[in-house]
Image (cartoon, rainbow, N blue to C red):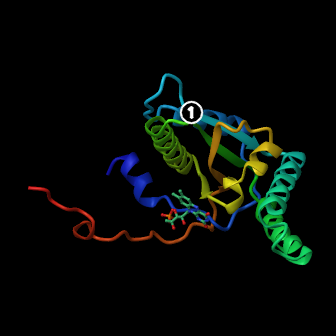
Amino acid sequence: MTETTKAILARRSIKRASSAPIERAKIDLLLEQAAYAPFHSKQEPWNVYIIGSKSGKEKLLQAIGKSIEATQGDTIAAEKKQELLEKNKQKLEKPPYLIIITAKQVEEEKKDFEAIAAVSAFIQNFQLLAWEAGVGMIWRTNKFIFDKAFARALDIPDENKVIGILYLSVLEDNVPEVKKRSPIEEWVTEIE
Ligand SMILES: Cc1cc2nc3c(=O)[nH]c(=O)nc-3n(C[C@H](O)[C@H](O)[C@H](O)COP(=O)(O)O)c2cc1C
């Protein structure tokens, strides 16, 4: 089995983050390598926003709060808002890094589709390379990433569509069992 095959088969989403530190230089190298993902535009469509400091996490939490206010402000009680915010705060505490990944959108269906597809390939490259380097993560598409108020609060331009937030963690005793996939007969169709 090649190292690539091993990483693809062994990788799991890490929900239980560890607070063990990750070297920033390691993340930069992994991002640089992940950028060899295929893309179909003049310029690479991805942008990456890295949050690793206490103040960065504070800003991220404030942005989540703004989104909760903008999208659910009128429909849920203040207590519920606080509860939602607290839940998000807890999820931000342990990961040494949170990485927001965006895809450049140009308001053209084909190009925008290709940008999201390329950024997804980038993210999977990053997940696999990180796995080999002892770093795990979970790719989350929290409700707030679809809200402009969230991105704007972090000075992310409107054309950079948030594709996900990666919650990073050192791989420790937090790796779940391999999750078997459905047999190919269930999803492969021969067209003759
Ligand atoms: C586009 C995308 C969005 C995801 N969003 C979430 C999420 O919001 N919350 C979550 O717990 N997991 C999320 N995941 C992780 C999936 O739940 C996970 O990949 C899936 O259960 C398969 O498990 P594995 O990654 O360990 O193989 C997401 C995965 C992808 C590809």
- Tell me: 124 left or right of 19: left
Above or below residue 9? Residue 160 is above
**Residue farthest toward the left in the current orientation of the protein:** 192
Q: If the image is split into quadrants, where does the C terminus sit?
A: bottom left
Above or below residue 90? Residue 119 is above
Point 22% across, 69% down: residue: 185
**Residue farthest toward the top in the current orientation of the protein:** 42
In the picture of the structure, the residue carrying the numbered disc 1 is 106
- Tell me: 5 left or right of 58: left
Residue 159 drawn at (x, y percent): 65, 36
Residue 151 drawn at (x, y percent): 75, 46
Quadrant location of residue 182? bottom left
Quadrant location of residue 191? bottom left
Residue 147 seen in render: yes
Looking at the image, which is closer to me, 154 or 183?
Answer: 154
Above or below residue 80? Residue 22 is above
Point 43% across, 38% down: residue: 110
